[in-house]
Image (cartoon, rainbow, N blue to C red):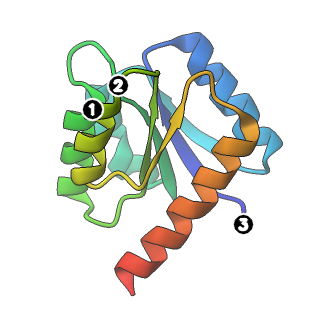
Amino acid sequence: MALNIMVVDDSLIMAQKLKAMLGELGHTVVRTCKDGAEAVRDYPLVKPDLVTMDITMPGMDGIDTLKAIKGMDPFARIIMVTSHGQEAMVLRAVEAGALGYVLKPVAKDRLAAMADRAMVRAQKRSA
């Protein structure tokens, strides 16, 4: 299933890599946001099927951004993108409503599996 996806990452290079990988997987990146404030502002405008969210960003981090988006849309589907060594933050993100995570450097097959799993989990939660 092709998804409309919002990518949130303060690294332009990482955002471009995610956009390219998601495109190769048949998805469309409908918005790329460089920080949490931009993501919170733009989420209701684009209403993506899925959000990939960097955890560590200046200003509003990924967990606070996740909480803000979930506050607007409890059914928002968000997966975290994180570096090794951030297990505690990943756990907090999952507790706050993230549907899963992928580790940097992101592998395309892992990204595909997590996107599919996130959509299945979201369907189960809304059923």
Nearest the viewer among 64 and 44 is: 64
Q: Secondary structure at mark 2?
A: loop
**Residue 116 drawn above or below residue 91:** below
Quarter of the image with the N terminus is: bottom right
* Residue 39 pos. (x, y %): 35, 35
Residue 126: horizontal and vertical position, in percent? 37, 80
Taking the spot 22% from the left edge, 41% from the top edge, the residue there is 92
Question: Which of 108/66 is in front?
Answer: 108
Given contact means CB atoms under 8 Å apart, are the residues at marks 2 and 1 in contact?
A: yes
The amino acid beneath tag 1 is Met
Query: Which tag, 3 or 2, sits closer to the chain's start?
Result: 3
Q: Position of residue 48 (x, y in %)?
A: 49, 53
Distance between the alpha carbons at the discs numbered 3 and 2 = 30 Å
Judge the density around disc 2: few (<14), some (14-19), many (≥20) Cα neighbours within 10 Å: few
Residue 29, compared with residue 77, is above or below; it is: above
In the rendered image, which residue does mark 2 sit on?
Answer: 86
Q: Which residue is mark 3?
A: 1
Q: Are marks 3 and 1 in contact (CB under 8 Å)?
A: no
Tell me the element at label 1.
helix
Q: Residues within 10 Å of mark 1 (few under 14, many from 20)?
A: some
